[in-house]
């Protein structure tokens, strides 16, 4: 019996170490109910934790190139070491020249990454870094607003500052925040007149190790969120499982994810 147990544990460990981290899922989400206009396509890349341009990252690049998004959202923790900025340069160049929005994650604070150098590198590749700030992009003939909050776990999100400088009442706007505990307790029913078209978050890695979609432990800063859709006072929130790994180099029951949103 113990031989069977050893074989099972070895097989499970091998799967978590070698198979699932390479098994990229492209999740697709159709947003909005209006007809008669061309939808724009948004891709969310979260928690890349870029360490090398390896097979999983090449799969992400190929998916982005194939999907041809109008805009990419980088929802934090793209890198977690200062020495990988040259790799980030290569990675961003491979994604293409489309418009991109980025926010900071907890590892952008914890690591030795020079955030000024990161911002300059982002700007080189058409990436707008938002920290308690906003911008608007023209996408498929529509002005779409983007609000990027500072990380709620390791930074200082300032929603009042955002409200004072960003026009979220008169244009469709998407809210981005790396750590989902910012959003508070999920609601059982949709919020009335939510201020945002929808919101995007990451950080959790889907638990990174989960049993039947239930994480063994979510990282601090996750709040009551793991992955997928939730209703909050800000409107609908999508929490991505992200791409990379943190602390331990395994994934189990939480496949890496590129999330695609077609918004009409």
Image (tube, helix red, strand yellow):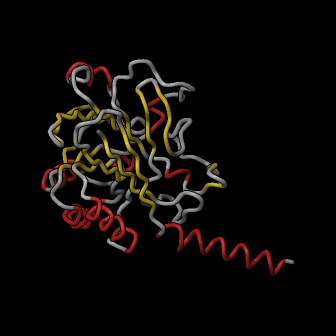
200 or 80, which is in the foreground? 200
Q: Residue at x 45, y 23 (%)?
A: 233
On the image, the x and y values in percent for residue 115 come to 24, 48
In which quadrant of the rendered image does the C terminus lie? top left
- Going by the picture, which residue comes out furthest to the bottom? 3
In which quadrant of the rendered image does the N terminus lie? bottom right
Q: Residue at x 30, y 66 (%)?
A: 61
Residue 30's quadrant in the figure? top left
On the image, the x and y values in percent for residue 126 come to 15, 51
On the image, the x and y values in percent for residue 78 come to 33, 55
On the image, the x and y values in percent for residue 114 come to 24, 52
98 or 263, which is in the foreground? 263
175 or 47, which is in the foreground? 175
- Going by the picture, which residue comes out furthest to the right? 1
Q: Residue at x 35, y 33 (%)?
A: 33
Q: Residue at x 26, y 64 (%)?
A: 65
Q: As displayed, is residue 193 above or below residue 172?
A: above
Residue 2's quadrant in the figure? bottom right
Q: As displayed, is residue 166 above or below residue 230?
A: above
| Marker count (numbered) | 0
205 on left or right of 120: right
């Amino acid at each position: 019996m113990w031989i069977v147990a050893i074989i099972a544990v070895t097989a499970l460990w091998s799967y978590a170490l070698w198979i699932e981290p390479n098994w990229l899922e492209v999740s697709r989400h159709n947003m909005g109910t209006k007809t008669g206009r061309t939808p724009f396509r948004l891709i969310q890349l979260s928690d890349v934790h870029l360490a090398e341009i390896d097979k999983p990252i090449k799969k992400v690049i190929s998916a982005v190139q194939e999907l041809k998004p109008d805009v990419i959202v980088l929802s934090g923790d793209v890198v977690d070491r200062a020495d990988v900025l040259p790799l980030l340069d290569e990675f961003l160049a491979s994604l293409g020249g489309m418009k991109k929005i980025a926010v900071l994650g907890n590892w952008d604070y914890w690591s030795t990454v020079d955030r000024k150098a990161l911002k300059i590198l982002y700007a080189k590749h058409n990436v707008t870094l938002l920290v308690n700030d906003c911008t608007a992009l023209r996408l498929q003939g529509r002005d779409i607003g983007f609000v990027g909050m500072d990380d709620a776990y390791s930074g200082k999100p300032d929603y009042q500052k955002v409200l004072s400088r960003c026009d979220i009442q008169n244009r469709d706007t998407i809210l981005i925040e790396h750590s989902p505990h910012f959003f508070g307790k999920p609601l059982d029913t949709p919020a009335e007149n939510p201020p945002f078209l929808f919101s995007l978050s990451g950080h959790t890695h889907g638990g990174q190790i989960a049993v039947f979609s239930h994480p063994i432990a979510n990282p601090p800063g996750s709040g009551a969120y793991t992955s997928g859709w939730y209703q909050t006072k800000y409107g609908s929130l999508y929490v991505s499982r992200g791409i990379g790994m943190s602390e331990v180099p395994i994934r189990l029951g939480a496949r890496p994810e590129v999330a695609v949103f077609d918004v009409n």
